Amino acid sequence: MSWLVLIVSGVLETVWAAALGAAKGFSRPIPIITFAVALLLSMSGLAYALRTIPLGTGYAVWVGIGAVGTAVYGIVAQHDPASFGRIACLVLIVAGVVGLKVLH
């Protein structure tokens, strides 16, 4: 159960990061509310997961999911560059996250 909560919390990290960008300096109310709720749920889920998952592993997986999710969101929705190098680096992050889970 902790791993599922950790994965959902990582996805919520992507949500709050995207909402933070959409908030335009905290000037738009709906993105601000989305940011706050997603941040609270993401941190709460991380805290719950860290009760049974080692800190270093849990935090690295959470950040990895959030980083890859946010980068993919940027590529798909914000038209950030999708070069071979960027995609390769994202694949390496995913490989690291999977490795941390497998070696746990």
Image (cartoon, rainbow, N blue to C red):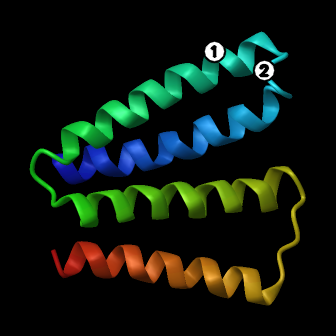
The residue positioned 52% from the left and 43% from the top of the image is: 13
Question: Height in image: 56 above or below 98?
Answer: above
Q: What element carries label 2?
A: loop
* Residue 83 rendering spot, x and y as whole percentages: 83, 82
Instruction: Report the residue marked by disc 2.
Output: 26
Dot 2, how many residues are within 10 Å of its Cα: few (below 14), some (14-19), or many (20+)?
some
The residue positioned 65% from the left and 54% from the top of the image is: 70
Looking at the image, tell me whether mark 2 or mark 1 is earlier in sequence order: 2
100 and 73: which is toward the camera: 100
The residue positioned 80% from the left and 62% from the top of the image is: 75
In space, the residues marked 2 and 1 are separated at their CA atoms by 10 Å
* Residue 84 rendering spot, x and y as whole percentages: 78, 88
* Residue 42 rendering spot, x and y as whole percentages: 41, 36
Instruction: Report the residue marked by disc 1.
Output: 33
Say which mark, if any, is on residue 79. Answer: none
Q: What residue type is labelled 1?
A: Ile
